[in-house]
Image (cartoon, grey):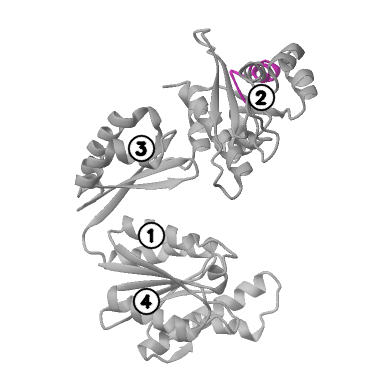
Amino acid sequence: MTAEILCVGTELLLGSIVNTNAAFLSRELAACGIFTYYQSVVGDNAGRLKDCLALSLARSDIVIITGGLGPTYDDLTKETVAEYFGLEMEMHEPSIERLKKFFAQYNREMTPNNAKQAMMPRGCTVFSNNYGTAPGLAVEKNGKTAIMLPGPPREMEPMYREEVMPFLQKKQSGKTLLSKTVHIFGMGESQVEHNLGEMMRNSANPTIAPYAKEGEVELRVTASGQNKEECMALISPAIEKIQGEIGEFIYGIDVKSLQNAVVSKLCEKKLRLATAESCTGGLVGKRITEIAGSSDVYLGGIVSYANSVKIGQLGVPEHILERYGAVSEQTALAMCEGAAKNFGADIGISTTGIAGPGGGSEEKPVGLVWVGVYFKNPVTGELAHRAVKLNLARRMHRDEREMIRYIASSNALCEILKLFR
């Protein structure tokens, strides 16, 4: 069984919002064993939407449409689908009653145009919206199915999981697709393919596909089988082989991000972290504190942009700054040690560098970054104290300064994980 994703909204075409719905639905459909070969985006125009719908249903069994179910004049999805299938629109009484209760609950006036959200194609299946006002729905005719979901992810995602997934599972082909993602940092996409090219080309089930991200590479290992257990039996040996080839660059399997991996590892080891940042301006701390539970392991950080702060708050010796400069191995080492001792942390991490666009020199060019790590093992007493030199300039990035800062913060996070390899 095949499905196609069709996202409706002129704001998507203009780039005003990011289309996260397609990524979510792709993952969820694969988990149900439903294959997706095409995705489309169309603006709020009935004629173009009808053309896209006809094309989608000509090549797929199911089309899932997000957006265009609201109360305004340009919300045309239901009406267009009903016209395509030759179905009349009629009031769905449970939906209109639900709408009335919703507005009464919040003591708000229900304007007449809101009733439009309760108008449905005759004979459709209606999906309740527990997080908004627009119900979802499915129309089935001549072996084809059109599923319509609200556009906002906070409404669409729970509706899919709670109501659409059970609806689709009754239709699935009997096959399950399962994917595991190998997260790689410190090795570019071309190098990953060079090391694993033969394996990637020759693997049919599971398949192995690379995806490049900002400073990272993901390998999606996907297997098809009768159930999840059969899929895992195919995936596990492939991941073991990948780990055998490039294991030193792998920071996790199915983790959301580097910062997730760091917080998880620190929680597991019951270790506390402090940061000292110059060129990254607090970005390392920001990324760590994005993760729930980070308060258990992250004590705090100092943004020591000025040398006076490096000296006064982190205890960096003045003679080191005078002799070696703020962007140096010696300063990075002093900063991370100062952070750890200042906060009473087990681990101190530091960043100092030249993010540009100005400030570089022949000796210290834009993109030069030092990352310092200080770790006194509370069990063994062993001390790890090192600094890593990075050259992050690419000279082709449209916003190189932010790219340098972001990749520097990623390297800092990765250096924490290296302590436990």
Q: Residue at x 58, y 84 (%)?
A: 115
On the image, numbered disc 1 is attached to which residue?
A: 26
Of mark 4 and mark 2, the one earlier in the sequence is: 4
Can I make out residue 120 in this image? no
Number of the front mark, 4 or 2: 2
Report the amino acid beneath label 2: Val
Of mark 3 and mark 4, the one earlier in the sequence is: 4
Taking the image as shown, residue 42 lies to the left or right of residue 205, namely right
Q: Is residue 266 or residue 327 the one in the foreground?
A: 327
Of mark 1 and mark 3, the one earlier in the sequence is: 1
Considering the image in quadrants, where does the C terminus appear?
top left
Taking the image as shown, residue 300 lies to the left or right of residue 98, namely right
Taking the image as shown, residue 410 lies to the left or right of residue 281, namely left
Picture coordinates of residue 250, whole percent (x, y) = 39, 33
On the image, numbered disc 4 is attached to which residue?
A: 146
Report the amino acid beneath label 1: Ser
On the image, numbered disc 2 is attached to which residue?
A: 327
The magenta stretch is 337-351
Taking the image as shown, residue 195 lies to the left or right of residue 136, namely left
Residue 107's image quarter? bottom right
Number of the front mark, 2 or 1: 2
286 in relation to 171, above or below? above
Picture coordinates of residue 226, whole percent (x, y) = 19, 53
Query: Are circles 4 and 2 on residues that touch, CB within 8 Å?
Result: no
Considering the image in quadrants, where does the N terminus appear?
bottom left
Report the amino acid beneath label 4: Ala
Q: How far separated are the C-alphas under marks 3 and 4?
A: 42 Å
On the image, numbered disc 3 is attached to which residue?
A: 191
